[in-house]
Amino acid sequence: MSTCIVLYKSGKDKEAQELYERVKNQLNVLKVEELSCRRIETDCDFAIVVGGDGTVLRAVKCVSVPIVGFKAGRIGFLTPYKIEEAEQFLTDLQDGSLVLEKRWMLRIVMGEREFDAVNDAIVRAKTKPMSEFKVSIDSCSDLDFFADGVLVSTPTGSTAYNLSLGGAIVIPSCEVVQIMPVAPYYLQNRSIVLPADRNIHIVSQLESELVVDGVCVGTTKEIFVSRSSRSFSLLRPKRYDFFSVLKNKVGYGKGVNES
């Protein structure tokens, strides 16, 4: 019998309890608890996370085991199952119909501090609405932007803040990183897609906030971004269709006759 833990978003305790009742006879559930910021070291096969994509993002940094997401949020790129599909999940698990999908992260260095980002990192002007940002990529010529900020995102994060800024949608398996100026003054609102092994250096003329996966972690005038040595794993059914989620949840590529 597989062992697991159930972690849930604050306010989703009823959904987590319902899921527990549905799976407890076929899984050895070690604990059911609200997800917090603390690290969870538990010897189990996987973690079930109840919430939205944001909850999965938080769980990634709290556990070292594969994660299977159950949707109790809005979008669902990282949560392939609904609560009422618990029996289907158990069937997929028993039949060996789950795929282990490994995804990489970004490493952000700010002074002596380091952070790992699942989705993205943004440097944004703090004292004034806009600032001048200089972006250096390895030994190439510098790029200069007068903007609210500069966003760097992974393929996983391409459908998060990057998408709302008009950035490119990237299939999660791609080995690329994306740079996007935020609300630039000139007509520079196009993203740049680079190989994931490139090193990025961003310098702001003004003191700016560094936001990693939606959380402000401090202020700085420069950061260094590269591919992290850390990764995380998601469990999803073989039938999971990334493009179906795009159509049904975001509306991208949806025909006029599709409801």
Image: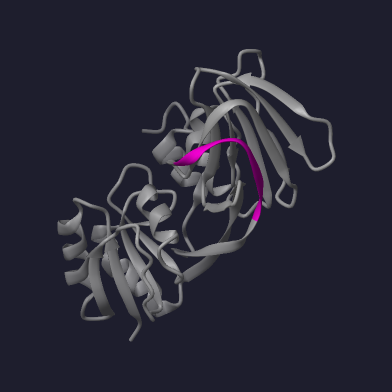
Q: Is residue 36 left or right of residue 141?
A: left
Tell me residue 111's x, y (percent): 61, 46
Observer able to see residue 201: yes
Number of numbered callouts drawn: 0
Residue closer to the observer: 17 or 126: 126
Tell me residue 143's x, y (percent): 75, 27
Specify the quadrant of the image occupied by residue 5.
bottom left
Residue shown at 53% from the left, 29% from the top: 124
Observer able to see residue 79: no
Tell me residue 171's x, y (percent): 59, 48
Residue shown at 52% from the left, 68% from the top: 100
Tell me residue 185's x, y (percent): 61, 13
Specify the quadrant of the image occupied by residue 130.
top right
Q: Is residue 216 above or below residue 38?
A: above
Q: Quadrant of the N terminus?
A: bottom left
Q: Mostly what secondary structure, the magenta segment?
A: strand
Residue shown at 58% from the left, 63% from the top: 230
* Residues drawn in magenta: 217-227
Q: Quadrant of the C terminus?
A: top left
Residue shown at 67% from the left, 19% from the top: 188
Residue closer to the observer: 50 or 226: 226
Residue closer to the observer: 27 or 146: 146
- Asked whether 49 falls inside the magenta stretch, the response is no
- Asked whether 220 falls inside the magenta stretch, the response is yes
Q: Is residue 259 above or below residue 31?
A: above
Residue closer to the observer: 77 or 243: 77
Q: Is residue 164 above or below residue 58?
A: above
Colouring: one colour
